[in-house]
Each structure stands twice: as C-alpha cells, then as structure tokens.
Amino acid sequence: MSFKKTMLAVAAVTALTAATAVPAMALENEFHGMYRAFGFLTNAETGTAAFNLRDEPKDSFFAEQRARLMYIAKANDDLKLVTHFELDARFGGSDSAPKYPAGDGGSLDADRVTLETKNVYLDFNIPTTPVNMKVGIQPFSDAYQGVFGAFDGAGAVASAKVGPFTPTLGWFRLGDNNYLSTADETLPGDNTIDLLVLDGKFAVNKDIVVGASYYNVQNDTGAGATTGAPVTGYELLHQLGVNASAKVGPAALTGFVAYQFGDFSDTRDLSAFAAAAIAKIAVGPGKINASALYLSGDESSATAGTSNFNSFRQVAANGLTSYFNPSNMWLLIRNGATINSSTAIGSADLTKGSQGLMGIFGGYEMAMGKAFGSANVGYARVDEKRGAESSSIGTELNATIGYKLYDNLAASFTAAYLVLGDGADSATAPLAGVGAANADNPYLTNIQLSYLF
C-alpha cells in the first residue's frame, strides 16, 4: 500500500474511533432548506448541456424548480450528523441525464422518484484537541473561487484553528472502479480517482488573511489508455496556489494565483496557470463589483499534439463542478443561482475546447428597503485561438430587479444579452467549441422565486 493511502487509512480509523467514543445524548433537531423556481424565455438555453448558438435560433420558454431539505441531528456542540437532500424538476418533465434523472417529478401526474442525496456526513470535534472532523458525503469548495472545483463528494476532512492559523487536510474519492471494462479487475480501491487537499489560512490581522494550498489528483483508472484521455482530463495533477483577502477602507479585495503540473497523458505533461483579482467596494447604497479572471489555454485540442498541455484543468472533465461566481454573468459564465437547465457559451468548465479564458467583469448592486437590483457588464476571450479570425467571445450586459415579498421570500426579474465577438460568430473559422458561423446574439430573461428557511 502506498504511503498516501496508508496515511488516509490511519486518519479514517482515528476519526471513526473518536466518533464512537462519544456517549449517547438527547438530540436537538434542526431543519433548513430552500426552494427556487425559474421561468426562462431565451434563444440560448436548450435545457441540455448544449448552448443554442446558431443562425436564427428559435425562442423557447421553460420552467424548472429546485428544493433542498437539510436535517441536522445535533447531539451537542461537538457532534452532529448533517443530511442534505435535493429535489429538481423541469415543468413538464425531462429525461436529459445527467441534468435530470429519468424519473423527473415535473412530468404529468408527478409520481416519480426524484430525491437526490447532496450531503450525508458526520461533523465532530476531537476531544481535548482543536481538530474538527467531517466524514462522509460533504461540500467542498477550493480556495480559488471554484475555478478548480466546488462540489459535493465523499471523503474525510480535518481542520483546526490554532491562533491565527487554520490548517486543513482533506481526502476525497472521486471515482472507484467507475470506468473499467468488464475484462478488468474490479476490486474496490485498485482503480480510483483521489483528490488530496492541503490548505492553510493565516490571519495577519483582522483585515488581512493569506493562504496557500496544494491539491493532488491521482487518476488510477487507466481510462486514458483506451479513450485517448483520462476521465478527469488528466492522469496526474499537482496544483500549487496562493491566495489573499483584505479589507481596505470601503473595499474588500481578493486575489489568487495557481499553477498546475503533472501528467496530462502518457505523452504530454501538464503545465497550466490561473489567476484572478476581485474587488467589492461600498459606494452609496450598494457595492461596486469588479473582477478579472485568467485561465491558460492550449494551442491544440486535448487529443492532439505531443508538447506540454497548457490548458488549466478542473477537478472534473465535464466541468459541472466549476464556477466563477464573482463575474455575475449569465451567458458568458454560468450563474451560481441557476438550476439544471442553464449553461453558458463556454459550458460550465469555463474553458470550452481547452482554449482557456481571459475575462473582465464589473457591475453595481444595491438594496433599498425590500427592493434590490444589480447591473453588470463583462467581456471574455479565449487565451489560445485555433484558426479563428479573432479570440473574442463577446460582451455581456445583464440586469436584475427584485423585491422581498417576505423576509425569506424574494421575487426577481433578470435580463441578459450577449454581443458576440468576432471569434464567436465568424463565418469562416469560429472558435472551436464556442463559436458558430453567423450566429445571432444570445439573450436570456427569467423570473425567479427564491425561498429560504
């Protein structure tokens, strides 16, 4: 057994032993959750993974909803079991997996099995130590605004607060014999995808926090030998990064830089970068939001070339676990408030076609009494174009107005419009995986109801 797997096994045994040593007590029950419903009118969203970018696209209207139910069984301040479930449905039903299961409850008469597991994990403090443990299916968000990964996964995470220093050590099993043919060995733990997380935060003072991290993804599934590329988009990934946040007068500033290296495939090494800067500045009754994002791209596709592969990689190849919410976009980058049916021009992985991304975004948000609203603009281009006349994806304009009907129920209306760049609507060589010849500018409008409890 490797050193890494030995240490993980020791940590797991220690965690389980500590949990069983806690005496039984009367439970305190907590219930939380949310409900969100959208009605979309758009010429861009198709309700599937594809973005409807074409000449003279059709307009469509669809509606969907999401409910999340959280139950926490709390024994005391040091021990609790957290469970979190999700129910998604498109009005009228859908079987467009993986966005919706075949039993979508939005179908006629509604009798379907739609309850999804989001989280089930034990959260406890180890007695006489500053260490907190979370063991089970739990949420994880990277230290880089989600551009590497923000997901729910099965694993174990230990964290502690020692004065101004907060270290975190985590392990997630992303796959275990999920991708093998019937002719291969199928013993659990032999062909796996594992994520190892080592992260540290240091509070310099009450206004400045600096951090550093190391992520490692080991793909032992062997899928790359038969499909041309590993399931996760790489065979071995190391990521080193630094990040910082600071409050300077009315401004809250955040930034990061990350570097990836390792084995993209048997013939290509991985060498990629990511960086971002984010600012929120209190002005008048609201805040100015500004952000910039860079993800390196590659001159060739994932299945071509023999030199280093320079496209920044997400934790999952399908990109469904990657975000950059500070952009506040809807069409250039998938918005964090959306449910299953929406996507963005570059898909959810931010780097459609492995060409990377360079984006700058800005806007203003405000609230006055029960009314609230925002307006945003963003521009994006790929880092590496492949034969296209231009690297420009486009410029998005969007705005939202809303009203709180109750303290925990809000209604809002959003409109977004994307002016395609020369690289996205080129008649001769549109951007690979992003553009379409003579494409019309995409738009999106939606009405949203959001309830939290």
Image: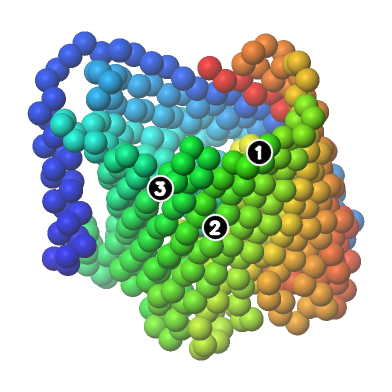
First along the sequence among labels 3 and 1: 3
Relative depth, front residue between 74 and 57: 74
Cα–Cα span, label 2 and label 1? 21 Å
Give, as a three-letter code, the residue at label 2. Answer: Phe
Q: Compared to 1, does 26 lie above or below?
A: above
Q: As drawn, is 213 to the left or to the right of 47?
A: left
The residue sitting at 43% across, 65% down in the picture is 240
- Location of the N terminus by quadrant is bottom left
Which element carries disc 1, helix, strand or loop?
A: loop
Q: Residue at x 73, y 22 (%)?
A: 411
Residue located beneath label 2 in the image = 256
* Label 3 to label 2: alpha-carbon separation: 15 Å
Between discs 2 and 1, the one toward the N terminus: 1
Q: Residues within 10 Å of mark 2 (few under 14, many from 20)?
A: many
In the displayed structure, 86 sits above or below 307; it is above
Which is in the foreground here, disc 2 or disc 1? Answer: 1
Q: Amino acid at mark 1?
A: Gly
Residue 356, quarter of the rendered image? bottom right
Q: Is residue 97 left or right of residue 404?
A: left
Q: Which residue is mark 1?
A: 249
The residue pinned by badge 3 equals 202
Q: Is residue 281 visible?
A: yes
Q: CA distance from mark 3 to mark 1?
A: 21 Å
Residue drawn at x 65%, y 71% is 355
Q: Amino acid at mark 3?
A: Phe
